[in-house]
Amino acid sequence: MSDEANRAAFMEIQGRMIETTGKLKQVQNQIRNKETEKKRAFLTLEELGQLPDSTNTYKAAGRTFLLEPKSVLVNEQQQKLKDSETAISSLQTSKEYLEKQKADVENNLRELLQQDPSLAQQIMSMSVM
């Protein structure tokens, strides 16, 4: 009876581990995307800063370009920069939480395997095949 309960607990922990790892990878990808967006906005702001205020600037809208004042483009890029920074800090918090959750699941798994060495042997024999 105990063996079956340990096996069920292992399956549950394994499922949580897979789920947590997937969420963690997703958050890491989102962080990378936001950092890229932030860098692009920063570089665009640097280039716009070098232009005189009277310069014609264009904004991409699908496959067309619209004439926009430089100040509008600068404001948009500054907003993108701020939004990216906010999103990155929020995602970092989520990442830290998921990393703690993953560590807890790993500890639970380690305790279960130490508690029932026969389960560990069964798992090792299954993964070899």
Image (cartoon, rainbow, N blue to C red):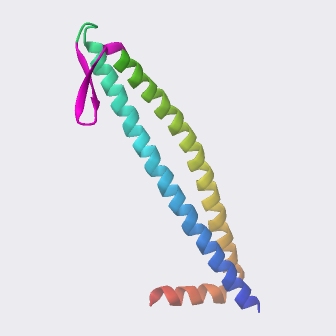
Going by the image, does 32 lie left or right of 9? left
Q: Does 61 appear in magenta?
A: yes
Residue at 43 percent across and 29 percent down: it is 80
Residue at 64 percent across and 73 percent down: it is 13
Q: Where is residue 49 in the image (x, y as percent from the top left)?
A: 31, 14
Residue at 52 percent across and 37 percent down: it is 87
Magenta-drawn segment: 56-71
Is the residue 30 above or below the residue 103 in the image? above
Q: Looking at the rendering, in which quadrant would you find the C terminus?
A: bottom left
Q: Position of residue 54 (x, y in %)?
A: 25, 7
| Residue extending farthest bottom | 1
Q: Quadrant of residue 102?
A: bottom right
Which residue is more in the foreground, 93 or 58?
A: 58
Residue at 48 percent across and 27 percent down: it is 82
Which residue is more in the foreground, 113 or 14?
A: 14
| Residue extending farthest right | 1
Q: Where is residue 107 in the image (x, y as percent from the top left)?
A: 66, 67
Q: Position of residue 20 (x, y in %)?
A: 57, 62
* Total count of labels: 0
Going by the image, does 77 lie left or right of 115? left
Q: Quadrant of residue 122?
A: bottom right
Q: Does 102 appear in magenta?
A: no
Q: Quadrant of residue 73?
A: top left
